[in-house]
Amino acid sequence: MHVHTSLAAALALVFAGSALAQDNPAQIELAGGKLELKAPESWVRKAPQTRIVEHEFAIPAAAGDKADGRFTIMAAGGSVDANIDRWYAQFSQPDGGSTKDKATVKKTTASGLNVHVVDMSGTYKDQRGPVAPAVERPNYRMLAAIIETGGAGNYFLKFYGPEKTVAANEKAFVEMVEGLQKK
């Protein structure tokens, strides 16, 4: 049984993350190789925790933070606004206010594609899978981007973690999104 589990885990790594086997772990291919992002060198590529996530990275915790940040990329359906609203619902505010009212959303372009960048913070309801229980994480922040690719659907880039860790990596996240390349 143990050998079977190890073999299954090894196969899951091979099939779940062909990107894990890339020569340059910072290179991220999307849309069947038609788009490319470059993750910061300090981010650590990991096997995705769920099947719907295509790429996942751990972002080392900043001084004073107890947990690493998490960055995921996935393709999904639904409108841009519906997905941003779903992200708002993942946060609550200590004062009971509206996350939507406190968040910022900026529409920009990268390589000619529309990109929506979202920044929000508060208590994050961290749910690592569709049926996993949510864990409330106070003082968290999320930077996220939705890349509208047209024919290949939308890609969702989600970076969240303790506020200091996200703040320390904000510039790198923005540079990665702005550096999106068509291949």
Image (cartoon, rainbow, N blue to C red):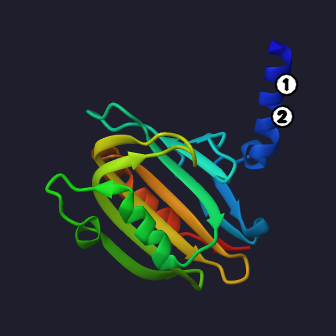
Q: Nearer the viewer, residue 2 or 142?
A: 2
CA distance for labels 2 and 1? 6 Å
Q: Check whether the beta carbons of the residues at disc 2 and disc 1 lie within 8 A of each other.
A: yes
Q: Is residue 124 left or right of residue 56?
A: left
Q: How many marks?
A: 2
Single out the residue that lies furthest toward the top: 2
Quarter of the view holding residue 52: bottom right
The residue located at (27%, 55%) in the rendering is 92
Q: Position of residue 149 (x, y in %)?
A: 65, 79
Q: Nearer the viewer, residue 79 or 10?
A: 79
- Residue under label 2, please give it: 11
The label shown at residue 7 is 1
Q: Is residue 145 left or right of residue 65?
A: right
Amino acid residing under circle 2: Leu
Asked which secondary structure carries label 2, the reply is helix
Quadrant location, the C terminus: bottom right
The residue located at (84%, 14%) in the rendering is 1
Note whether 37 is above or below 132 in the view shown: below
The residue located at (51%, 50%) in the rendering is 71
Asked which secondary structure carries label 1, the reply is helix
Q: Position of residue 5 (x, y in %)?
A: 80, 22
Q: Position of residue 150 (x, y in %)?
A: 67, 83
Amino acid residing under circle 1: Leu
Circle 2 residues within 10 Å: few <14, some 14–19, many ≥20:
few
Note whether 13 is above or below 30 in the view shown: above
